[in-house]
Amino acid sequence: SRVPSVPRNAASVDVHIATVLSSAAGSCPLGAPRPPFLAGGSLLAPGGRLGSLHFRPRPHAAGVSLASLASGRVGSAPLAVEVGYALADALGNVSISGNASGTLRLLGDGTLLRRVKKSWRLRLDGDGLLGVTEVALRAQGDDSTRIRELLTNELYASMCVAAYAMVPVQVYLRDEYAGLHMMTEWLDRTFAQRAFGEPRAGATLYMMQRGFSFQLLGPSAELYARGCYNAFGDGAAGCREGFAQAAAFGLCCQGAPMYGAVPLDSGAGADLAARGLSAAEAMARLVWAVNRGTDEELARILDVESLLRLMVVDLAVGKWDGFWRACSNYALYLDGMADPLFRVVPIDADQAFDPRLLWAGLRTTWDSFCCINASWACIGGVQQLVRRVLTPGRFRERFLVLLDGFLFTAFRPGPGSPVRVRVELLHGALLPALLGDDDCQDASREPWVCPSGDLSAEFRLLAAYAHDRACYLLAALLHGVICGSWPACELS
């Protein structure tokens, strides 16, 4: 291996996140989701060791080799898995090591699969390890520090927002180092049980398609089941790629919902059929409440408090490729059909702490994040749910109160900033493993991934962004201009 062990004196990084990132709102509100396991644990094993996963072909597994796995010439491969600490840490700070068997499959689209460093989906056989049967091993290829998403998820936890657990782990394919990956909890029934408790009848996870914007299409659920949106004056000529003109003027449909609905309770399909309910009907109810319902009606079908807390974090870390800035990278958890309650679950925050603006040196002088008329991203032009909760009234007032608390606690500026302390600790803990990834040392490095050309400088830039962004938002909050140009603003 080219990767040296983390020195034993690095045990000082074994700091509980719950201590470093104090909750911006004190105790979580009644009924709030349970924080990720990692929020009460640490990243490293005793002695400062990073977790590791070693993958080797099972005996008699024909055609499985390091070359085939790394190149992606096989879709999946049966493997023997040796686990050192990492899985247990993500599940409650119980240190174990052991063996299991499972299947490793490449994860990602065509662009991601062309990269040298791959992301993987690991399915463990039988009962898995400590009840975990499926995780993602994410390469975080757009982030040389590998910690942007981890930091963001920790900040979600500090604000009592449900997010998947993550832990850094060194991955080895047949004893050859394959880089530092973020082992990530899979969004499934196990996640729902951990985050929200036992799923009720009809509980469903909606994996939202990029661009869904809560646009009202009428009382019928059929148009949501067909994946339609209203192109308004553009008519058929304005239909996006993959959509076609419907019989009704101005409607564009793709023939399938703009989400994947995954039932989570036992026998959910039969229960739904017996009651005559559907995922599309539940979605139609939510969209109606967003656009036409009273505040009380919206709060009955949507966990607005959790959504506002999520939006506070997204605004602070500049998650431009997310729920309210680009109508992407989120899921909706529906807790039961009899008395439906939706919760927004964030996904994929490796574009947080805005690397584009770090690269350009424009860390603070921007307000376009608050624009929601992003027709290039949101299908139908405007994120209707964000428009609703940011309209002057009780929801916007609560958002500003939560933002104020967040900026004075978990995201406060200055040398004692919890985020800055956390970045410095992670820098010391992960640097030896990151050096083996060569994101900054390689002459063919991507400027997007490592704009400074120096790995340690990337960590300093990240901490500087958090400080500058906090100062900017505090000043904007003081002068009452948070999202002051919303929604009639131009996107650069």
Image (cartoon, rainbow, N blue to C red):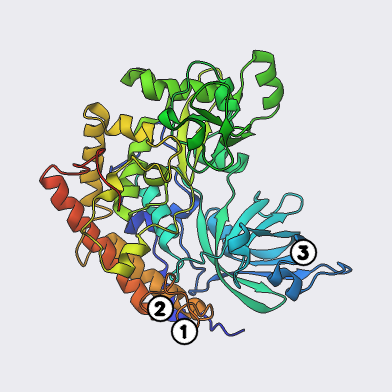
Q: Nearer the viewer, mark 3 or mark 2?
A: 3
Decide if residue 20 is on the left or right side of residue 153: left
Which quadrant is home to the N terminus? bottom right
Cα gap from disc 1 to disc 2, whole angstroms: 8 Å
Few, some or many C-alpha atoms within 10 Å of disc 1 (few <14, some 14-19, many ≥20)? some
Residue indicated by mark 3: 74
* In this view, 18 is above or below 203: below
Few, some or many C-alpha atoms within 10 Å of disc 2 (few <14, some 14-19, many ≥20)? many
Amino acid type indicated by mark 1 = Gln
**Residue 309 image point, x, y percent:** 33, 41
Amino acid type indicated by mark 3 = Val
Decide if residue 340 is on the left or right side of residue 131: left
Decide if residue 101 is on the left or right side of residue 364: right
Can residue 82 be seen here?
yes
Cα gap from disc 3 to disc 2, whole angstroms: 33 Å
* In this view, 283 is above or below 468: above
Give yes or no for contact between labels 3 and 2 (Cβ–Cβ under 8 Å). Answer: no
Element on which disc 1 rests: loop
- The earlier-in-sequence mark between 3 and 2 is 3
Residue indicated by mark 2: 455
Few, some or many C-alpha atoms within 10 Å of disc 3 (few <14, some 14-19, many ≥20)? some
Amino acid type indicated by mark 2 = Leu
Give yes or no for contact between labels 1 and 2 (Cβ–Cβ under 8 Å). Answer: yes
Residue indicated by mark 1: 441
- The earlier-in-sequence mark between 3 and 1 is 3
Instruction: Give 409 or 477, whichever is nearer the viewer.
Output: 477
